[in-house]
Amino acid sequence: MTSTVSAPAATTESPARGLVCRACGAEYPLVAQHACYECFGPLEVAYDSAALARVTRAQIEAGPQNIWRYAGLLPAGQDPATRVTLDPGLTPLVSAPGLAARLGITAPLWVKDDSANPTHSFKDRVVSVALTAARGLGFTRYACASTGNLANSVAAHAARAGVPSIVFIPHDLEPGKIITTAVYGGELVAIQGSYDDVNRLCGELVETDEFEDTAFVNVNVRPFYAEGSKTLGYEVAEQLGWRIPAQVVIPMASGELLTKVDKAFSELVEIGLVDAPAGGWTVFGAQSAGCNPIATALQGGTDEIVPVKPTGIAKSLNIGDPAAGAYAIEAVKRTGGWMDYADDDEIRDGIRLLAETTGVFAETAGGTTVAVLKKLVESGKLDPAKETVVLNTGEGLKTLDAVAELVGPTHTIKPSLRGAREAGLLG
Ligand SMILES: Cc1ncc(COP(=O)(O)O)c(C=O)c1O
Ligand SMILES: [Zn+2]
């Protein structure tokens, strides 16, 4: 940790004061519970606003070069000794003038490249916060229901902490997601069903005596897990010099990430760490055509999400029954944004366009987001004259199959000058 003369020491107390129902407002203590007993609505962490307001820019800037610099705004992990973490975060915010030019965007365009996290997706953020909270709540085994990236991250965090893990995935994930989970040595259960089947089963397992000691990061400790996504929003603002961009394009599976980036911006304004941009900020959501229940609902003018059976190459986004979908729609509508979706060919084009213009190789989720950014510009929903940040949440090396047949050597030659000449590489 670097130190400055002016930053008063950050407190080791959590600013969280309880859990609150997102639907009816009922309040609960900070325990491993994710649904409201009154109305079955999802719970989220509520904070003591005075405690949040004590956090200063100087304190954050003097903190570690990872998500824990925002510990004063998170529910757990204020004391470094209590953390279960790979220290993710402070990933690059890449200026993308080449991509902007290709899309007709005239204002600054940025790619927040979360493939630079320890297990190469933004999920390290949510897992670090969830498992730190889980450890404090006394859990001794770590688990999740995953579309791939979460599996990588839970298995790696458990390995680093020396705690057993059991990770549940759909059996038909990309090899690049299965291998990069299995290598960490925990239990890995492939289920003959979709992610939604996996999630349902985990919801049943968590109620059994055998799993009483187990924290499922996105089931029983979900309220803490979800808060980890706020750090993406905080970082974007800090890296822009404590400014919130006018527009952000965000991939959606459950829709949670989108709601938490929006929440992060709101908190920063509320506690006076940044001024809201003139005209506020606008959030946009990206899905694939093979799994677009949130975007379809918004485009149809409703927040009633009709679950779908997902298909298509953007497997990390394939949640057919998205838990935070209605809240994502609320955030997009409130900020004047829009949602759209891209088909598999458009996703492949998105991966290549991003790679060719920025040097960032995204997985299918990032390809989806770039493809949707392009559509939003073309449809006039996104203002090309306003500063925009697009989130790349995962790593292209994990989904190589998506582009394997589209790219390769441009020349194959014999190892001689003659070979080079024959291929047209020499005069
Ligand atoms: C790479 C990637 N991006 C985005 C998401 C979407 O996250 P959320 O479920 O919070 O909408 C996921 C979820 O698994 C993911 O793996
Ligand atoms: Zn409720």
Image (cartoon, helix red, strand yellow):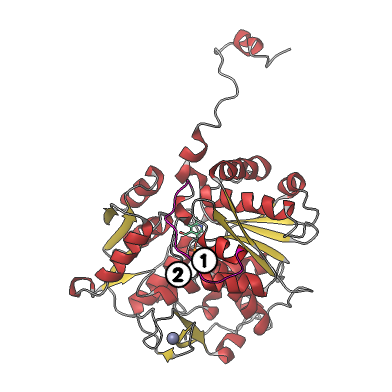
Q: Give the x, y percent position of residue 337.
A: 68, 66
Sequence-earlier tag: 2 or 1: 1
Q: Give the x, y percent position of residue 286.
A: 58, 58
* Residue 76, quarter of picture: bottom left
Q: Residue at x 59, y 66 (%)?
A: 298
| Residue range of the region highlighted in magenta in the rendering | 300-313
Identify the residue under disc 1: 255
Q: Is residue 418 left or right of residue 117?
A: right
The answer to whether residue 125 is magenta is no
Q: Mark 2: which amino acid?
A: Ala
Q: Secondary structure at mark 1?
A: loop
Answer above or below: position of 169 versus 425: below
State which quarter of the image contains the C terminus.
Answer: top right
Q: Are marks 2 and 1 in contact (CB under 8 Å)?
A: yes
The answer to which of 335 and 97 lies nearer the viewer is 335
Answer above or below: position of 52 versus 364: below
The answer to whether residue 306 is magenta is yes
Residue count near mark 2 (Cα–Cα under 10 Å), binned few <14, some 14–19, many ≥20: some
Identify the residue under disc 2: 323
Answer above or below: position of 99 versus 279: above
Q: Residue furthest top?
A: 418
Q: Give the x, y percent position of residue 200.
A: 32, 66
